[in-house]
Image (spheres, grey):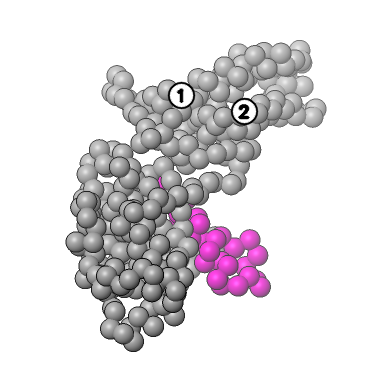
Amino acid sequence: MERMLAIRLPWWSADRAARALRTQAALQPEGVPTAELDARALRRFAAWCLRYGPRAVVEASPGEPAVCVQVTGCEQVHGGWSRLLGRVRDDLARRELRGSAAVARTTAAALVAAVHRPWQAQLEDDALVWMADAPLASLRLEPEVLDTLATVGVHTVGPFARLPADGMGDRFGAAPRKRLQLALGQVPERLPSIVHRGAVRAMIEFDGPTSQAEAVTLAARQCVERLAQSLLRRRLGTLHLRVRLDRAHAAPTRIDLRRARASRRAEHLWRRVQPHLERVHLGHDPAQGVQGVRVTSLRHAALGLGQWKLLEGAAALEDGADQCWSE
């Protein structure tokens, strides 16, 4: 059953941390509208929120800025919903962001809870029980719909749910009623994922050029393992892997490996890289050898968390066929 975490950021534009994120997100600080910088910064913040669950998205419906994270199956990872919400509260405080968060069965319900019952998990089968007295604005309806309903005395979700569907559809269209159905879990919702777009890389530089195959092989394997850990932290799998050997006095040697399915398992990636690396001629003169090794993921896709096991006192990733464990 679905579990969604909604993080509401009502003071986004006023917070110092938000302004710092806007500055980081700006490719051209001069002449870029503030709204566009806010959108970029919110996407960066949503990517940062992938530490809570395998998928995250910026909430695009009307209302205050918010980020929604799919945390289905992650309760045990975080030690319970209360501990997860406490972690979110601490993380927001460290980033000097003011906001609220809540967990519910759907994205729309979690957004309502973040306003009406913040820092709680609302997982009742009948969401309308706790949502009935929530302010209607928490459903994130269009402002003109809220204004019209306010003139007839409808200010909370309960009275809105009792209005006839046909009359609502004729007056406002299907969108307001669908928003209520999403909150109650009566219609399915799809959560697209934020994906890290930049290259993910790992590199090792030698003190001087070398033509020793063992040294180059060991460095390449260490880079593959570091890259796998970086992909894990970003909840990604690589689709295009490039290994580059930087030469002292020659053009670099490149090995490109493309995949139809995303992967981040270090053992699997190394089995793909090793045969190509063994065929690379390193030369006989150390001065003409390799100065450094770079392993880069040029293209990647979202990939959920795998299961973890404790092996000889160290955490090891055991995600089998790279399937998201929450699925």
Q: Give residue 254's quadrant in the image.
A: top right
Q: CA distance from mark 2 to mark 1?
A: 14 Å
Image: 49 above or below 7: above
Magenta-drawn segment: 25-51
Neighbour class for label 2 at 10 Å: few (<14), some, many (≥20)? few
Q: Is 233 placed left or right of 313 in the picture? A: right
Q: Can see residue 296?
A: no
Residue 56 screen position, x and y as percent: 44, 50
Q: Is 139 placed left or right of 213 in the picture? A: left
Q: Quadrant of the C terminus?
A: top left
Question: On residue 289, which mark appears?
Answer: none
Query: Disc 2 or 1, which lies upstream in sequence?
Result: 2
State the residue lying farthest toward the bottom. 151
Q: Nearer the viewer, residue 191 or 279?
A: 191
Residue 36 screen position, x and y as percent: 58, 67
- Residue sitting at x 55%, y 31%: 262
Q: Amino acid at mark 2?
A: Arg
CB within 8 Å, label 2 to label 1: no
- Residue sitting at x 50%, y 40%: 302
Q: Amino acid at mark 1?
A: Ala
Q: Residue 229 in magenta?
A: no
Q: Is 280 placed left or right of 116 in the picture? A: right
Q: Residue 31 in magenta?
A: yes
Q: Can see residue 261?
A: yes
Q: Is 62 placed left or right of 91 in the picture? A: right
Neighbour class for label 1 at 10 Å: few (<14), some, many (≥20)? few
Q: Give residue 308's quadrant in the image.
A: top left
Q: Nearer the viewer, residue 31 or 1?
A: 1
- Residue indicated by mark 1: 321
Tell me the chief SS of the magenta region.
helix
- Residue indicated by mark 2: 259
Image: 132 above or below 44: below
